[in-house]
Image: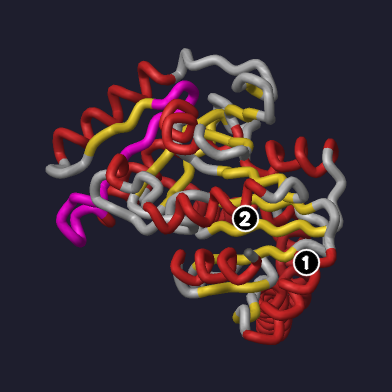
Amino acid sequence: MGEIVNAIKTALTMPVKKQMANMISMQRSLQRYNIHHWVNLFMERLNHIKHEQKALETQLLDKTITSRLTKGYQAAKKRMIFLDYDGTLVGFDSDPLKTKPDKGLKAILAKLTADKRNRVVVISGRGRDTLEDWLSEFDLEIIAEHGVWIKEKGKKFRTLTSLNDNWKGPIMKVLDGYVDRTPGSFVEKKDYSLVWHYRKVETGLGEARTRELTSHLKYITVDRNLKVLEGNKVVEIKNSEIDKGRAATVWLNKHPSDFVMACGDDWTDEDTFKVMPDSAYTIKVGTTSSAAKYRVTDFHDIRKLLKSLL
């Protein structure tokens, strides 16, 4: 209230020349920023957004496209196939450790990797130890923790850049606080990331806590070179310079291929889709907007597609 009183007093006691100068400035602003200006600006932004949405629309992977994809696969001498794990090759479970490869998936991966023309890369947010334990029997390569760790054929796991985990202590205290307040949630600790799971949390409460936690984490990590990722019933915190796309580029640069395909289900896979060559077949699992060219309904469709290639 005091500020308003002071502003009125300043206006009334201001020299006439100053009043006139301010009035002229205000009139010029009103002439430029009138109702027509704001309506035009709003419509331009709306059209821009609609164009962006149109660009992110994905086409259903129908029989015609599948046939073209299959012919491209069969004709290629060198093939590069990037496959996300959770939500793409397997469904989700309230217990993340209960989604080990089943017999059906093992059969697909065995045949896919047996073909020497194929270079198969499983690119996942899961920890490297879990992926190696589950997939070591297959002749494939691994990108773990959203690109933190990569494992090429005949080599050990390595990181793409120098990383530190000094930030994990303070962030862990925050996550523990949300676990205490959210029955059913828990924290998964990885080498260079932390994941808050809420798949077992009561519907409604989990979503509310997620919005609160994400906002909190983005505020406290703004100057820490960290990235906050929202996945399917998870919130993950990791170093910002790492993503799936950067890791996938290692393979694209080292192993030029006649046929390239990438499949993924959540927004962390968008980084993968964006670095793929124009000729690549990029496939999104789900119906949300995506940089992928094509979409399917669920992981069963991806398995069906892989079977058709074999």
Q: In this view, does 207 lie to the left or right of 91?
A: left
Q: Is residue 190 above or below residue 105?
A: above
Q: In this view, does 308 lie to the left or right of 8?
A: right
Dot 2 falls on a residue whose secondary structure is helix
Residue designated by label 1 = 74
- Tell which tag, 2 or 1, sits nearer the viewer: 1
Was residue 107 drawn as part of the magenta stretch in this picture? no
Was residue 193 drawn as part of the magenta stretch in this picture? yes
Amino acid of disc 1: Gln
Q: Where is residue 116 in the image (x, y as percent from the top left)?
A: 74, 46
Dot 1 falls on a residue whose secondary structure is helix
Q: Is residue 66 above or below residue 305?
A: below
- Please give the range of residues in magenta: 190-206
Rendered image: mark on residue 270: 2
Q: Which residue is drawn at 20% across and 35% down?
A: 179
Residue in the foreground of this view, choosing between 138 and 53: 138
The quadrant of the rendering that contains the C terminus is bottom right
Q: In this view, does 72 lie to the left or right of 33?
A: right
Q: Position of residue 269 (x, y in %)?
A: 58, 52
Q: Nearer the N terminus, badge 2 or badge 1?
A: 1
Q: Is residue 248 left or right of residue 156?
A: right
Q: Residue at x 65, y 73 (%)?
A: 294
Q: Where is residue 227 in the image (x, y as percent from the top left)?
A: 53, 36
Q: Residue at x 49, y 58 (%)?
A: 88
Amino acid of disc 2: Glu
Mark 1 crowdedness (10 Å alpha carbons): few <14, some 14-19, many ≥20: few
Residue in the foreground of this view, choosing between 181 and 261: 261
Q: Is residue 26 visible?
A: yes
